[in-house]
Image (spheres, rainbow, N blue to C red):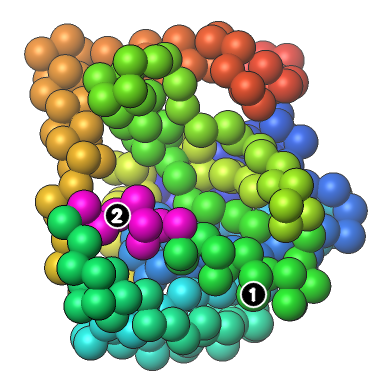
Amino acid sequence: MKLQKLLSLTRKAVDEFHMIQPGDRIAVGVSGGKDSIAMLCALNGLRRFYPAPFSIEAVTVSLGLEGFDLEPVKALCREMEVPYTVVSTEIGKIIFQDRKEENPCSLCAKMRKGAFNEKAKELGCNKIAYAHHKDDVIETMLMSLILEGRFHTFSPVTYLDRMDLTLIRPMLYVDEADVKGFLNKYRLPTVKNPCPADGYTQREYAKELLARLNREQPGARERMFTAILKSGFSGWENRTPKKGR
């Protein structure tokens, strides 16, 4: 995928769900993985021509695990002239050594989000951005349906009243396959996730299930996403599609 397509899909989400207003200062969550690197590139490119001027701050929450080398991300941010902050924590030690959590993902995510939100406020940001793409949207819906017994997925825009921050997801129209293609085309760096639980999660199960469904019923993935767009889920009902889309 070329940068032009990534910018077009990102702008579509930003426009249709009214994600960015003039003067916004957005903390971009950068884990170092492919999705967050693609989002960083997308928002950096978008800010150069978007009619509502905004600024971005790249932020990484480090869990304190060995083998987490952020030098490639630091170099990329320097190249793009994007301010970059690493939040050092002991979340990894708390989760895996102190508490020895059997199912660590939920608590870890909660602690990472808390650290990220606090740093965003400290940096003077009024918005935060997560790199959830189209596949994440559908997988979350499948997980909710199978594991919780409800038809639900996350919202494109969410106001976090306790922190007075607005969470946006500008990658929701981008396919995961295109994210991989984008990084390969431009030879962009990623950072290996050192988490011991990586690859053994319920999301991995949902990812495999979605891939199987789409193989057996070609087009199922897109039809699921269309169903979500039409669902009336909280936040999704505020969509304002442009004519011709």
- The relative height of residue 177 versus residue 182 in the rendered view (above or below) is above
Q: From the image, state whether disc 2 or disc 1 is nearer to you.
A: 2
Residue type at mark 1? Answer: Lys
Closer-to-camera residue (197/237): 197
- Give the residue number, with chain letter if any, for mark 2: 105
The image quadrant of residue 240 is: top right
Q: Is residue 77 left or right of residue 14?
A: left
What is the quadrant of residue 147 in the picture?
Answer: top left
Outermost residue, front direction?
A: 99
Identify the residue at image location x=25%, y=77%: 98
Whether residue 49 can be seen here:
no
Q: Which mark is residue 149?
A: none
Is residue 188 found left or right of 9 in the rendered image? left
**Residue 69 horizontal/vertical position (percent):** 31, 87
Instruction: Give the tally of numbered discs.
Output: 2
Distance from label 2 to label 1 (Cα)?
21 Å
Q: Nearer the viewer, residue 118 or 245?
A: 118
Looking at numbered disc 2 in the image, what kind of residue is underneath it? Cys
Residue 58 locus on image (x, y percent): 59, 73
Q: Indicate the quadrant containing the C terminus: top left, top right, bottom left or bottom right.
A: top right
Q: Secondary structure at mark 2?
A: helix
Which of the 4 quarters of the picture holds residue 37? Answer: bottom left
Which residue in the structure is indicated by mark 1?
A: 119
